[in-house]
């Protein structure tokens, strides 16, 4: 069960990162923060991961 929760958490964080930043990188090569470009489909997918995580025991 711990492994399933781990993969749900990883899916949530990764999908959230790519929802906010198309390249998945918050910072550019100079250390400046990139502009957020919210991808609505990826944001919805991250919410799916989060809702499954909250449904699971211990969530």
Image (cartoon, rainbow, N blue to C red):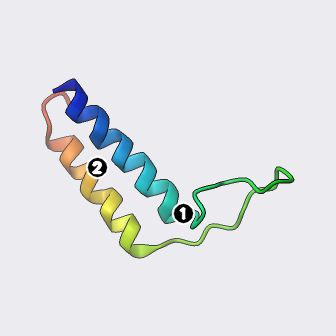
Front-most of residues 39 and 3? 3
Q: In the visual, does 28 lie left or right of 44?
A: right
Question: Number of labelled discs?
Answer: 2
The residue that mark 2 highlights is: 50
Q: Quadrant of residue 5?
A: top left
Front-most of residues 54 and 18? 18
Front-most of residues 37 and 30? 30
Q: Quadrant of residue 55?
A: top left
Q: Position of residue 14 (x, y in %)?
A: 44, 50
Report the residue at 28% width, 49% height from top: 50
Q: Position of residue 26 (x, y in %)?
A: 66, 54
Report the residue at 54% width, 63% height from top: 20
Q: Quadrant of residue 25?
A: bottom right
Q: In the visual, does 54 lie left or right of 41?
A: left
Q: Among all residues in the image, which is located at the extreme right?
A: 30
- Residue 5 disc label: none
């Amino acid at each position: 069960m711990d492994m399933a929760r781990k993969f749900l958490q990883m899916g949530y964080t990764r999908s959230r990162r790519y929802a906010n930043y198309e390249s998945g990188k918050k910072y550019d090569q100079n250390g400046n923060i990139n502009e957020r470009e919210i991808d609505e489909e990826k944001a919805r997918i991250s919410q799916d991961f989060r809702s499954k995580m909250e449904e699971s025991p211990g969530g």
